[in-house]
Amino acid sequence: MNLKPMTVVYRKELRDLLRDRRTVRSMIVLPVVLMPLMLVGLGKVARAVDARARAEIPLVQIVGGTDSPGILARLQNDPKVRVEPATDDWRQLIADRKIRAAVEIPDHFEAGLKDGTGAKITIYEYEGELRSGFAAGELETFFRRLSFEVARQRLAARGLTPAMLQPFTTQRENVAPPAKVAGNRIGGFVPYFIVILCFTGAMYPAIDLTAGEKERGTMEPLLCCPLARTEIVLGKFFMILTSSLAAVVLACLSLAVCIRFGGFDNRAASLGLDHVDPFGAAGVLVLILPVAVLFSSIMLTLGLWARSFREAQSYLQPMMFLIIFPAIIGMMPGIELNTRLALVPILNVSLASREMLGGVWHWPELRLIFFSMIAYAATALAVAVRMFNRETVIFRT
Amino acid sequence: MISTHLLTKSFYDKQRGDIRAVDGVSLEVRPGQIYGLLGANGAGKTTVMRLLATLIRPSSGSATVGGKDVGREGAAVRAQVGFLAASTALYGRLTAREVITYFGELNGLKRAEVKIRLERLATELEMHDFLDRRCEGFSTGMKQKTSIARTLIHDPAVMIFDEPTLGLDVLSARAIVRFVQNCRALGKTVIYSTHMMHEAEKICDRIGIIHGGRLLAEGTLAELRQRTGELEVEEVFVKTISQKGTS
C-alpha cells in the first residue's frame, strides 16, 4: 500500500466536500451553532422562562373556607398570590390555565385550629405546568408556615419552647471541587451531543463519497486508475473520519469560545461548563477517536452497499436511532460503568465520558473501553475495505 | 495490444441463477487498430470492457493488455489504459483543471508533468475558456472535452471506449468519433463497444459481433459481408446473430 495515492484521493475529497453545502452544514455549521445553542442558549432560554414564571403573582381560587375568615384574610394579604373567590368551574379554569391553582379549605378549619382537631388542606394544580406548580408551591408554603405557627402557639400555651419541634438542624455542603461538580452536571448530556455530532458529521460525506459517487458515474473512472482499491477506500475513509472529528472538535471549540467571549460567564457557571476538568475533556476526545473510526467505517460500508444517494440515506438515517439509544441510556442516572457495560459500544463511551468529566478515572474499565472500541472500529474498517474490493458491491445493480 | 483467450465472466443472480455475461471470448487488438465490439443491449459488451479495464475479474480464461495479465497485474494494466464511457461523469464541484490534475496524479504523474500535459491538451482541445470553471455548469461539449483530457492525461497506450456516444447529439458524437480515430492515428490500441451499426462501419478496422456473451463472428467488415452475403452492416449483424446466436 502506497501513501501518496491515498493522499491524492484524500485531498481531492476534501476539496470536493468543502464545496458541498450539505457537508459544510453537517461538518461545520451545525456543530459550531448547535452545541453552544443547546448547552448555553437553551439553558439561557429555560432560565428566562423560569424567571418570568417566578416573577408572576399567580391567581388562585379558594374553595370553601367561608367559616374561616381569619385564614381567608391572611391569604388575601399574602403578597405571593392573588386570591379570588371560587367559581363553580374552578377545575376547568385550572385546566384552561385561566387560574394557576386552587386551595380547598374544609369546613370549621379555623375553629379546628383553635380546639386542636386535625384538618386536611387540599391544593389543586395542573401537574407538569410550570406556573401552576409555582402557585401550588406558594400555597403550600403559606399553609406550612401557618401549621408551624399554630404548633408554636400550642407549645407556648403548654410552656414549651418552639425548639421542641426542631431538636436539631441539618445542612448540606459541597466538598467536591468545581470541576467534579461540573462534570457530574454535564457529564450525562455532553457525551450524548458529541456522539451525535460524531455521527452527523460523517453521514453526508460518507454517502457522497460512496453511493453519491456511484450514482453520479464518477466511480468507474476512479477504479480505472492504477492504484489499489484499498488505497482509494482508505483515502475516502480518512476524509469521512476527518469530517466526523471536525464536527466534534469544532463544536467543542465553538462552545469554549462562546463561554469565554460570549458573555455567558455567569449562566455557564451555573451549568458548570467553565469548570470542566481539561483532563476529563481530553479523555472524552481520546475515546471519541475510535467511535469516529467506527461510525466512519460503518457508514462507508453501508454507503458502498447502496446503489444511490437515497438508498444510502435510507440505511443511515435509521442508524441514528441505534446510536441515540445507548447514548440516552448513558445519560440515565443510576447506570454505572462496569466490565460488562464497558464492552457495549457507544454506551461504554457515554458512561466513561460521564465519569471522566466528573473526575473519576476507572483505569481498568477505561483501558477495556479504549481497546474494545479500537477492535470494533478496526473490524468495521476491515469490512469496509473488503466491501470496496468486492465487484458485486461496487457494481451492484 | 489487447489479447483475450476464452475470457469468461459469470454472475449469480437470485432470480436467474448463474449467468454467463461473457462466455469464452477470444479476440486480439493490435496497436493502431480500432476493434469494434458490436452488440445489442445486454450482449456483454460492457462486461468485456470492464474485464479489460480490470474493474472486474474474469471467472475463467485470460486476457492481457499491453502484455500485462488483467487478473494478476491489475495496476500495471490500468496504468496503460484510458477508459471512456457515456455513463462516466465528472466531479461537478471541481473545475476541469482540478479533475484532469486529479486523474494525472492518480496515474502517477508528478504535478509539474501534469501541468505541462494539461496545457498541451487544453490547447489541442480548445479548453482554455472553461478550464477553471466548475464542471457542474458545463455544456455537453465541455464535459466531453474534459472527459477526453482526463482519459488522455497519462498518455495511455490502450484506449477502451464503452459506448461513448450513447445519448449524445450528432455533433457531440462526431467529436468523439474524431477523437477515437485520432487515437488510431497516434498508434494506440483501441477497443470500442457500440450497438450503433453505422458507427462501427465508420470507424472500426475489425468488428466482433457479440451476443449472449459469446463472440459470434469477427473480422473486417468486408470479411463479415462476404461470410453473410449481406451488404448492409445491420443485415450482417442480424444474420450473424440469427444464424449463430441460436446454435
Image (spheres, coloured by chain):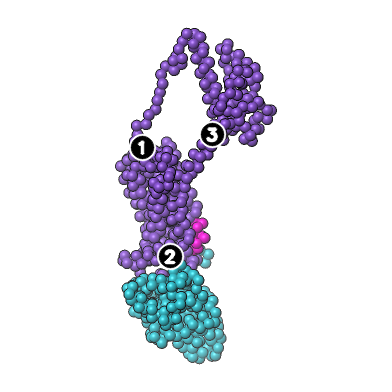
Position above or below: B31 against A102: below
Q: Which mark is residue A55?
A: 3
Determine the residue positioned at 58% across, 26% down. Answer: A123
Q: Is residue B20 visible?
A: no
**Which chain is mark 3 on?**
A
Disc 2 versus disc 1: distance between alpha carbons? 44 Å
Q: Amino acid at mark 3?
A: Ala
Question: Is residue A308 located in the magenta-colored stretch of the structure?
Answer: yes
Q: Which mark is residue B217?
A: none
| Mark 2 vs 1: CB contact within 8 A | no
**A367 to the left or right of A218:** left
Q: Main secondary structure of the magenta part?
A: helix
- Image depth: mark 2 or mark 1 in front: 1
Q: Which residue is mark 2?
A: A16
- Image depth: mark 3 or mark 2 in front: 3
Q: Amino acid at mark 1?
A: Pro
What colour is chain A? purple
